[in-house]
Image (cartoon, grey):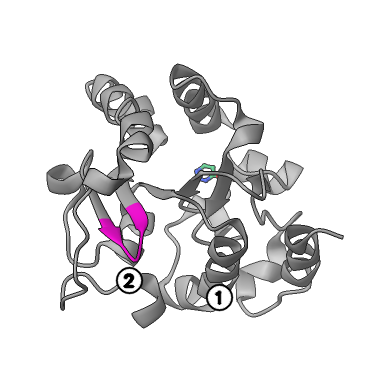
Amino acid sequence: MSALTELYKEIALCQQCEIARFRTNVVPGEGAEDADILFIGEAPGYHEDQQGRPFVGQAGQFLDELIASINLKREQVYIANVIKCRPTGNRDPLPTEIRNCRSWLERQIEIISPKIIVTLGRFSMSMFFPGKSISKIHGTAVKQDGVIYFAMYHPAAALHQAALRETIIADMKKIPALIEQEEEVEEEKPGPQQLNMFDM
Ligand code: URA
């Protein structure tokens, strides 16, 4: 059994948060175990909870288009979320839920060992770029311990604010070059504002 499949079994048993009691399915994530790109969204919504798969609703359709725009298929990347259960009524994830779920994400990162981690939206961004503002850092990359971190707006933002659509498309198009020219992305020393998620 693959390392991810084993992990999914463990995640399916998790009952750390109250929302676990209300889920139809846990949504651990999906994609290639050896993916170069790991996308991290926020939390499952209604459709994701129903199907047990990340990004299958409207925002997911846009994410699929974005992935296709860099000539990749969904199966070639990995898509995860900060939390694996749907927050009741689609509310924002709570800090305790993010903390409880963090070790699952850490293990996914360890197994996949991606070249680039792309944060989608502010909850995901704040795990890797604490204290930063998405309007300032979207489309910019930093590197720590050889891994590139790249912040993007959440695809759902384009559904609410049409003006962001082109920005999101343009940011996505930067990803292939970042992977190609990885050595040119400046390595940052972790400082107070750049703690990575393992230190939070
Ligand atoms: N939004 C997310 O952040 N994740 C999903 O899986 C679906 C929508």
Q: Secondary structure at mark 2?
A: loop
Residue 152 pos. (x, y %): 31, 41
Q: Is residue 57 magenta?
A: no
- Do we see residue 56 in this rendering? no
Which residue type does callout 2 highlight? Asn
Residue 176 pos. (x, y %): 38, 30
- Do we see residue 38 in this rendering? yes
From the viewer's side, name the closer residue of 152 and 33: 33
User: Is 104 on the left or on the right of 68, as rendered?
Assistant: right
Q: Secondary structure at mark 1?
A: helix
* Residue sitting farthest toward the right: 1
Compared to residue 194, the image places residue 34 above or below, namely above
Q: Quadrant of residue 158?
A: top left
Magenta extent: 143-148
- Dot 1, crowdedness within 10 Å: few (<14), some or many (≥20)? few
Look at mark 2 in the image and give the residue it sits on. 196
Q: Quadrant of residue 131?
A: bottom left
Residue 52 pos. (x, y %): 73, 48
Look at mark 1 in the image and give the residue it sits on. 103
Q: Residue at x 68, y 69 (%)?
A: 20
Mark in the foreground, 2 or 1 = 2
Image quadrant in which the C terminus is located? bottom left
Image quadrant in which the N terminus is located? bottom right
From the viewer's side, name the closer residue of 135 and 50: 135
Q: Residue at x 16, y 71 (%)?
A: 193
Compared to residue 123, the image places residue 171 above or below, namely above
Q: Residue at x 66, y 57 (%)?
A: 28
Residue 146 pos. (x, y %): 36, 59
Which residue type does callout 1 highlight? Ser
- Dot 2, crowdedness within 10 Å: few (<14), some or many (≥20)? some
